[in-house]
Amino acid sequence: MTNVAQNLHEKFVFYGKNAKEWMRKCVLLLPEINRLRIWEKKGFGSIHEYAAKLAGMSRNSVDEALRILRKVEDKPELRWVIDKKGINAIKPIVTIATQETADFWAEKAMEMSKNTLEVYVKEFKKAHVEEKNNKSEFLPRKEFYAVPQVQNISMELDPEIAKQLEKLKGQGNWNELMQKLLEAYKSQNEAKKPIPQENAKRYTSAKIKKYVLTKTNNTCAFPNCTKKYKYLHHADRFALTHEHNPDTLIPLCKAHERLAHAGLIENENMAPENWRIKTTADKASEKWQKVDKWVVKYYSGNFVGTEEVVEIT
Ligand SMILES: [Zn+2]
């Protein structure tokens, strides 16, 4: 790139960054401006007209900001995240965060992209329901919630393949046949299992890659995820072992790879069927105290209070 082009680009990035920061500050002022009906006192027909004319905000973004900010009124940690990363960053967690867990979720929202956070929240909710079912004495035991004995799935098959499968099933049942096919698929791949690559460079050998990907047919290995894999994850951390081991190399989609690297997967040393998401939001941790520090800084620095709002002209 020429110097001129680079210069233009840098200017754009700088102004863009500042524009976003100022917009986040506007957003945080909205609830108080709305509550005190400052827009009316200044001769505007509505909060929407006020925000559109003074800050170029769309009707939707005003409504959404007011809705979300109402939910985080009592959670300064999440307001702090809005100030730093914008309102989108906390959207996935507004319904799950409580006053007690707001610091935990603020930290996650700061560390993760919105997509990763969404996946984490989904897994977190699932894991929490399971935990509750297992622990509570007042609820019926887990058997009552057990998965059904059989499950129907419908498949679109080529008539020729359907005919061959019907033939293989014969007078038996589908479950037995599918089990046989699965075992055949597995053992065919197992027979070609390569030995671990020790003292390895970053790149995995084609043999190991093929073996690992065939195991899940290129699908992410996290339980119940059916996304295509994006990364080969070293469950034992390549940096520590310098080894590509076909047993601990796990194909993962982007979101599940991020969660693994954020240290949020339980049983990572076992086969992925045993993996669970960590749900430690209820426990205190020293790490979260850094969030408390952010919040103190937030309150002393740019706390949005009534007095400041009134000063707006
Ligand atoms: Zn996945």
Image (cartoon, grey):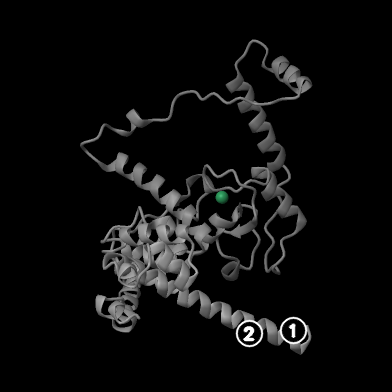
Q: Amino acid at mark 2?
A: Lys
Checking the image for residue 221, the label placed there is none
| Picture coordinates of residue 53, whole percent (x, y) | 47, 70
Specify the quadrant that holds the C terminus: bottom left
Question: Residue drawn at (25%, 75%), measured in percent from left and top?
Answer: 306
Residue 136, above or below 146: below
| Picture coordinates of residue 73, whole percent (x, y) | 28, 64
Residue 64, above or below 111: above
Disc 1 + disc 2, Cβ < 8 Å: no
Question: Residue drawn at (39%, 48%), measured in percent from left and top?
Answer: 125
Residue 46 in which image quadrant: bottom left
Task: Decide if residue 181 is on the left or right side of residue 160.
Answer: left
For marks 1 and 2, give the CA distance: 10 Å
Residue 291, above or below 221: below
Q: Amino acid at mark 1?
A: Ala
Residue closest to the far top = 171
**Label 2: how many Cα within 10 Å (few below 14, some 14–19, many 20+):** few
Question: Residue drawn at (48%, 54%), measured in percent from left and top?
Answer: 118
| Picture coordinates of residue 68, whole percent (x, y) | 37, 59
Chain-order first, disc 1 or disc 2: 1
Task: Decide if residue 298 is on the left or right side of residue 16.
Answer: left
* Residue position marked by numbered label 1 in the rendering: 5
| Picture coordinates of residue 200, whole percent (x, y) | 69, 67
Q: Is mark 2 within 8 Å of ligand 1?
A: no
Specify the quadrant that holds the N terminus: bottom right
* Residue position marked by numbered label 2 in the rendering: 11
**Label 1: how many Cα within 10 Å (few below 14, some 14–19, many 20+):** few
